[in-house]
Amino acid sequence: MRILVVEDEPKTAAYLRKGLSEHGYVVEAADNGIDGLQLALHGQFDLVLLDLMLAGLDGLSLLRQLRAQRNTPVLVLSARDTVDDRVAGLQLGADDYLVKPFAFSELLARVQTLLRRSQQRVDMVLHVDDLEVDLARRRVTRAGRRIDLTAKEFALLDYFVRHTGRVLSRTLIAEHVWGLSFDSDTNVVDVTVRRLRAKIDDGQASKLVHTLRGVGYIFEFRAA
Ligand code: CA
């Protein structure tokens, strides 16, 4: 897990880096808002710890610009403890707020909670190429365009997306999606795959559903 610490007080930054590293996190730090924003936008971080009073670019402005592009979880750390600041931070999309000074154990507990929460959120939204499958809301989009699926088509896509890159026989698909011991005379799998394929692949440069003649199907991204 990678954590970005944006904090201009060297002592606090060192304290956070040391404590979080000891708990197995990989920590990068920025000591001003401008560097912090660049790192947050272009690096791969699971969480950002953000001080509000920063040189260059203040924490709330950083948060506003970050949220325009990314939804990395943000825990605001601030000596300011007015209700207005807290509300402003949360309205701009901060996930939690901790007032300085704080006990490291409390910070750690909040970090762990935020990381766990975002991990669950990620698990509920699966991506293959530009296809996005939101399992909780049962919403499917490709390149941002909404795709309406029947319940069976959605169940089939769910199974495909969770088994990306694997060879799936008709029997396996039937057992998992229809829950029946498959009658090899029926072509229900092929018919449903064909409908699903028409909805997600037709008109797309790259295809996701691939037929292995006599074997079954593979669901994966292949460049056009
Ligand atoms: Ca500061």
Image (spheres, rainbow, N blue to C red):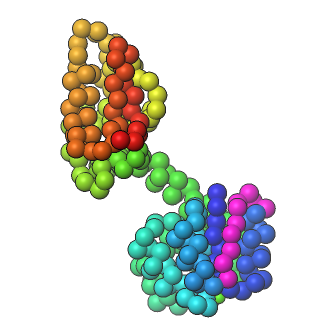
For ligand 1, give the image quadrant.
Answer: bottom right
Give the camera-side residue of 48 and 99: 48
Q: Residue 184 placed where, x, y %?
A: 29, 9
Against 103, residue 137 (above or below) is above
Against 121, residue 208 (above or below) is above
Q: Is 112 placed left or right of 161 in the picture?
A: right
Give the camera-side residue of 162 and 205: 205
- Quadrant that contains the C terminus: top left
Residue 28 is a magenta residue: yes
Q: Is residue 80 visible?
A: no
Q: Residue 132 placed where, x, y %?
A: 36, 49
Q: Is 220 placed left or right of 111 in the picture?
A: left
- Quadrant that contains the N terminus: bottom right
Q: Residue at x 61, y 80 (%)?
A: 35
Q: Residue at x 77, y 68 (%)?
A: 19
Give the camera-side residue of 164 and 149: 164
Q: Residue at x 76, y 63 (%)?
A: 21
Q: Residue 50 placed where, x, y %?
A: 59, 78
Against 160, residue 97 (above or below) is below
Quarter assignment of residue 114: bottom right
Q: Residue 192 placed where, x, y %?
A: 23, 27
Q: Residue at x 27, y 45 (%)?
A: 204
Q: Is 122 placed left or right of 13 in the picture?
A: left
Boundaries of the magenta span: 22-31
Residue 187 is a magenta residue: no
Q: Is residue 102 visible?
A: yes
Against 12, residue 216 (above or below) is above
